[in-house]
Amino acid sequence: MLFRLAPLALSLLPALAQAESLGIRFNEISPGTEFYYEGHGKLGVDKMDRYVGVRNGKHEFQSFFPRQGSYGKLFRISRYDSQGRLVEIEKIGVGTLTRFVPFHCDRSGQCKCTHERIVINPKRGTRKSTRKHFEIRKSGRKLNIISNANTNRLESSITLGDHNIVVKNTEATGNEKGGSKLVEIHKP
């Protein structure tokens, strides 16, 4: 039986080798580093992402909205696994926690990927689970991503910079378009 599985395992090696991880390289980023983004269009948002470090075994970014000339309103906490792939988002004002199993596909490095999206709302006592399918095309540092190609289609284009941090992001769904670009980095 083992000898029958060996050819199958060997046939999968080229596909596994091509699936490079595009996760954030946190070992190259100091805790306290801040990334400032400028939004454009309906889907864009001005924000500052601060890398906090590792908390409860996950790398953590805190995202802030601008408020009266500074970035003082925390609106989201994003958590990443040890390979820099998004696994959880906590929306502060809304009170929801979204988990991606096994991780969010946009950084998988695979041509096709499916993740389960679990949204938990402790205030309401609700839990909703959906599967999202992704097609990802990579060209150099740029990713073209189509999620839910058949329903509620969202097309994204992401350009990665140093440490695999997003430096430019554009999205389109229906008639709505927008995105953001990295405009400044402050190191501690």
Image (tube, rainbow, N blue to C red):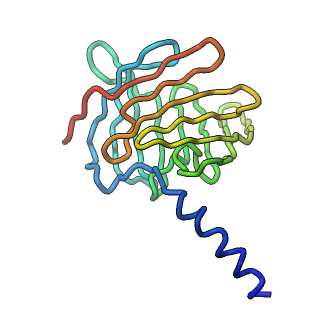
56 or 134: nearer the viewer: 134
44 or 123: nearer the viewer: 44
Relative horizontal placement of residue 38, taking residue 94 as reference (left or right): left
**x, y percent for residue 87:** 55, 48
The number of callouts visible is 0
**x, y percent for residue 38:** 35, 20
Q: Residue furthest left?
A: 188
Which quarter of the rendering shows the N terminus?
Answer: bottom right
56 or 30: nearer the viewer: 30
Depicted 183 relative to depicted 31: above or below: above
Identify the residue shown where x is 30% and y is 12%: 68
Depicted 1 relative to depicted 44: above or below: below
40 or 156: nearer the viewer: 156
**x, y percent for residue 138:** 50, 43
Which quarter of the rendering shows the C terminus?
Answer: top left
**x, y percent for residue 14:** 58, 66
Q: Residue furthest right?
A: 1
Identify the residue shown where x is 40% and y is 49%: 24
Give the quadrant of residue 15. Answer: bottom right
Depicted 10 relative to depicted 97: above or below: below
Depicted 146 relative to depicted 140: above or below: above
Relative horizontal placement of residue 117, taking residue 51 as reference (left or right): right
Identify the residue shown where x is 76% and y is 28%: 151
Identify the residue shown where x is 40% and y is 36%: 166
